[in-house]
Image (spheres, rainbow, N blue to C red):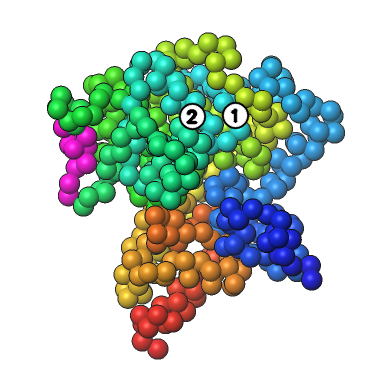
């Protein structure tokens, strides 16, 4: 049998995860579609956990990458200067930073999201001379020790095997209830010399918590947090690893709030093609690194520079951003309609942009919806501490026909699981 998973069960570590959720062997992908070795076609509403915002094997990026390899372009160069790096820096500055009046130095910390978070935390501590970092409930920032220390998920934290120090967790927006202002709580801790909370080096957060259940911070909450950070001289670090690069409707997720973070962490889709790539954006006055103080062998992924530069061509056209927002509105309309149509699942819509989903308190409901959707030919993951949210994460350039096709599969799955659980009358 071609689609025999035995070798993975026998030889691969028990730590494997996504191959359990999507039990088939994939061998081809294009745009918003994937195919397994038996030729079964799947709609991809997962997008490599956000690493494939433009879908699989974008033809323009693929062409540029093949040309670069064929012409013997530099593959590995640590942080030496290369034409590929030069082209990326210029394109990022001209297409993304300048039009948004953002003045950032670009750091290449290593190829993954946890690398960019680690560099941000180290820099904040170096600049301020303080050690503590404030993070928020249900935040997810990575799996290395520093990033894990500001991650909320208890299962992930236990994997460290050692105590995780020098961090304080505060309630995210609406964590307690819809009326309480969690930043009043934070301010009181900072103002009170008896609170036991020292003035931190940094505050780190996602504006939409991707793995934490699509919890969303309001623009008002973000503005207030920005004001607090400025008042106390605290670094504001926005982790845009998953919510950035157009996923929420704008290139940076924090744009609608009108704030300018001290540091921005980007990875996943910044590379465009799914190649390992991360950058850390730093306000120039904070760029106090000594040469080589934070380094790594693979911080100069030239092939990713090539695809990342080509990906930014999408953003040359203002209509591209509008198309993302139009699709986001369709997703919102669909999910809110689903909630009304199936009130028995007790669900409600969460997230924004093209990272939305439905949270259901009914035990196992969202996981079963995702599993059935996979059987029907749609790849979709769950999020939240208890996997209570099924999460729509299609490519941001998906066409409307494919989007509607995905909606149909999701609704069929919701209907079937609701009936299975006797939540709706037959």
Residue in the image at 44% along x and 82% along y: 420
Please identify the quarter of the rendering in which residue 5 is found. bottom right
Which residue in the rendered view is the most extreme toward the bottom?
Answer: 426
Q: Answer above or below: position of 169 versus 215.
A: above
184 inside magenta stretch = yes
Q: Which stretch is magenta? A: 179-188
Which residue in the rendered view is the most extreme toward the front?
Answer: 162
**SS of the residue at dot 2?**
helix
Q: Is residue 157 left or right of residue 55?
A: left
Q: Is residue 56 left or right of residue 190?
A: right
Question: Crowding near pointer 2: few (<14 within 10 Å), some, many (20+)?
Answer: many
125 inside magenta stretch = no
**Labels 2 and 1: the sequence-earlier one:** 1
Can residue 258 be seen? no
**SS of the residue at dot 1?**
loop
Q: Answer above or below: position of 248 versus 125.
A: below
Residue in the image at 37% along x and 69% along y: 363
Question: Crowding near pointer 1: few (<14 within 10 Å), some, many (20+)?
Answer: many
Residue 312 is situated, as x and y percent measured from the top left of the image, at 60, 34
- Determine contact: label 2, label 1, CB under 8 Å: yes
- The circle drawn on residue 118 is 2
Q: Is residue 377 left or right of residue 324?
A: right
């Amino acid at each position: 049998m071609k689609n025999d998973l035995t070798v993975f069960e026998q030889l691969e570590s028990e730590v494997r995860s996504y191959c359990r959720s999507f039990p088939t062997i994939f061998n081809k992908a294009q745009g918003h579609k994937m195919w397994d070795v038996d030729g079964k076609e799947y709609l991809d509403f997962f997008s490599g956990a956000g690493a494939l915002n433009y879908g699989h094997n974008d033809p323009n990026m693929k062409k540029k990458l093949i040309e670069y390899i064929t012409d013997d372009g530099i593959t590995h160069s640590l942080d030496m200067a290369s034409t590929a790096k030069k082209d990326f820096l210029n394109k990022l500055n001209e297409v993304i930073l300048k039009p948004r009046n953002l003045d950032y130095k670009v750091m290449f910390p290593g190829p993954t999201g946890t690398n960019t978070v680690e560099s941000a935390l180290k820099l904040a501590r170096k600049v301020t001379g303080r050690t503590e970092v404030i993070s928020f409930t249900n935040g997810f920032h990575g799996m290395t020790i520093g990033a894990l220390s500001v991650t909320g998920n208890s299962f992930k934290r236990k994997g460290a095997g050692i105590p995780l120090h020098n961090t304080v967790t505060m309630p995210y927006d609406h964590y307690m209830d819809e009326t309480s202002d969690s930043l009043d709580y934070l301010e009181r801790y900072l103002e009170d010399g008896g609170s036991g909370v020292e003035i931190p080096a940094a505050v780190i957060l996602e504006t939409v918590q991707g793995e934490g259940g699509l919890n969303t911070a309001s623009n008002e909450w973000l503005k207030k947090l920005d004001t607090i950070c400025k008042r106390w001289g605290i670094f504001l670090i926005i982790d845009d690893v998953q919510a950035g690069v157009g996923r929420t409707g704008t290139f940076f997720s924090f744009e609608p709030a009108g704030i300018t973070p001290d540091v921005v962490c980007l990875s996943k889709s910044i590379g465009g093609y799914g190649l390992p790539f991360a950058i850390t954006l730093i306000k120039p006055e904070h760029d106090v690194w000594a040469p080589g103080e934070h380094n790594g062998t693979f911080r100069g992924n030239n092939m990713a520079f090539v695809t990342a530069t080509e990906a930014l061509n999408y953003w040359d056209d203002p209509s591209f951003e509008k198309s993302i927002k139009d699709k986001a509105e369709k997703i919102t309309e669909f999910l809110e309609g689903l909630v009304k149509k199936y009130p028995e699942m007790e669900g409600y819509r969460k997230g924004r942009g093209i990272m939305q989903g439905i949270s259901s308190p009914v035990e196992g409901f969202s996981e079963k919806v995702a599993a059935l959707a996979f059987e029907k030919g749609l790849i979709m993951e769950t999020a939240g501490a208890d996997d209570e949210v099924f999460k729509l994460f299609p490519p941001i350039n998906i066409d409307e026909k494919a989007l509607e096709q995905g909606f149909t599969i999701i609704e069929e799955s919701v209907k079937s699981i609701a009936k299975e659980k006797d939540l709706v009358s037959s």
